[in-house]
Image: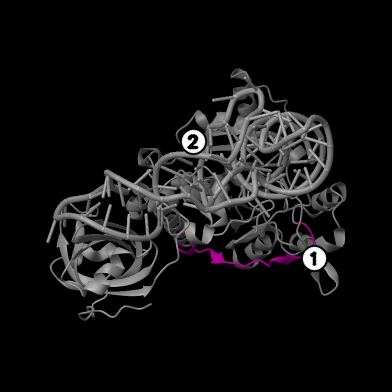
Amino acid sequence: MTVEPTTTLSSTIARVRDLAEHVASNVRVQGWLSNCRSSGKLLFLQVRDGSGIVQCVVRKGTLDDDLFEALKRLPNESSLEVSGTVKADERSPGGVEMSVDAARIVGEAAEYPITNKEHSTGFLMQHRHLWLRSSKQAATLRIRARIIKSIRDYFDSRGYVCLDAPMFTPAACEGTSTLFEVDYFGEPAYLTQSGQLYGEAGAMALGKVYVFGPAFRAEKSKTRRHLTEFWMVEPEIAYAELDDVMDIAEEYIATIVSDVLADCRPELEALERDVSKLEAVVPPFPRMTYTEAIEKLGAAGREVPWGEDFGAPDEDYLSSTSDKPILIHRYPASFKAFYMKRDPSDERLTLSLDMIAPEGYGEIIGGSERSADLEFLEKQIAEHDLPRADFEWYLDLRRYGTVPHGGFGMGLERVVAWICGTQHIRECIPFPRMLNKIYP
RNA sequence: UCCCCAGUAGCUCAGUUGGUUAGAGCACCUGACUGUUAAUCAGGGUGUCGGUGGUUCGAGUCCACCCUGGGGAGCCA
């Protein structure tokens, strides 16, 4: 039911975030009721418009009595427009409030399932489409958007070309992880796990590129660090060697953190993030080889046999030794991808790197220098039992003007989780896709 | 895929050794209150105890299997 206003709504529409600029003027806010408190002939409407929440004070008598009563009974998350004079007021949660002189109920809500009290994660995830309205979730999504802008700005301003890799692929890029199979006109095809190989083709054409898009992995992972659909940023740079790749990764991550600190203070505050932890993320980051990391783990009583990958608890230990991200390089070839270049000084090693985020957020970057050698890659494809025919185009990149090159992949949601201080990455993407979870 | 925990009102949970009619807070509804901050105060109980089968005189409670959710491992970004 729509209740007509007793007076006209202001023609000046303002965003809650900007209300401080409108003190003493009459503006209209378009939003949703996040909560309502009443005290006799006063109503305190907490109105949310996506940019913030403002307290709107309604005095009985200033509006039509029917409208006043309707507002008093208005369920949370009903949509409404209010207008009135903006005032600075210390008693108001935002420091600014509106003295309402006109209002219109746009859509009265049914009883809203999410309350100010506790809810289980399972319940909130089932209502993800509504949970996004909560202040912490909205803050996380704003920071995610800022991080995406920072990523694009970083590469665009340094001569990289954004290169969109295909989502449908004929075969596995890395051959190991589980693939989502789709029916492609009667033939099997797969959703991409990584755009990297296409990024390499792009780097040979354009010099420096970055692939930015979703990746799909049908791993039956059930941890706070995994999604079946996640977003990945993959720069690929012609003529870059391992040390160049590490320098870029370091500068890039530091820039993202610095941009968020500069532009997202209210969001970080809403998330109760300890910003001093982020302010410490300044180059240079500690670097160690895989072998040095194994020794460090061994000295701490955590024996990992040389040649085996670290487990998540091992990574957490290593990251706990620094308040910055750490770079670990030169992993053994035994558990790394087929296309990585070997270390000329020790053929057992790859010229690879991982970056591990502080505070136990795990691996956020994995990358390497790629092998530029045709014969080596032919042998690797055979040894890894990969379908040679599907990789002929990739081998062409070595046949026609091969050069040293390298790059890395960054998992967006893991970076968002780390910067926001969010325990589980499912809250760092609007609609997470996880093992057995595809609704809503 | 493996290990651990949980499933009782719309939500979060309690429910003793198996024993009569199933309990609380919040949400919600009604009323009071001219400055509330998750407002407060008074009144109101809304239920296929996850499902199926079993043990028993009797099952929310015990057993088996299944389903769903949560935490962790492996794997990864």
- Give the x, y percent position of residue A170: 79, 65
Marked residue chain, label 2: A
Q: Secondary structure at mark 2?
A: loop
Marked residue chain, label 1: A
Q: Quadrant of the N terminus of chain A?
A: bottom left
Q: Is residue A211 visible?
A: yes
Q: Which mark is residue A189?
A: 1
Q: Is residue A396 above or below residue A297?
A: below
Q: Is residue A289 visible?
A: no
Q: Earlier in the sequence, mark 2 or mark 1?
A: 1
Q: Are marks 2 and 1 in contact (CB under 8 Å)?
A: no
Residue type highlighted by circle 1: Ala
Q: Secondary structure at mark 1?
A: strand
Q: Is residue A302 above or below residue A310?
A: above
Residue A9 as seen in the image, left or right of residue A421: left
Quarter-of-image position of residue A212: bottom right
The prevailing secondary structure element of the residues shown in magenta is: loop
Within 10 angstroms of label 2, few (less than 14), some, or many (20 or more) residues? Answer: some
Which region shows up in magenta?
A153-172
Q: CA distance from mark 2 to mark 1?
A: 39 Å
Residue type highlighted by circle 2: Glu
- Give the x, y percent position of residue A286: 50, 34
Within 10 angstroms of label 1, few (less than 14), some, or many (20 or more) residues? Answer: some
Q: Residue at x 55, y 45 (%)?
A: A246
For label 2, the residue is A359
Q: Quadrant of the C terminus of chain A?
A: bottom right
Q: Residue at x 53, y 57 (%)?
A: A128
Q: In this orientation, which residue lies closer to the viewer: A167 or A12?
A: A12
Q: Residue at x 86, y 72 (%)?
A: A186
Give yes or no for residue A55 being in the magenta stretch.
no
Q: In this orientation, which residue lies closer to the viewer: A14 or A45?
A: A45
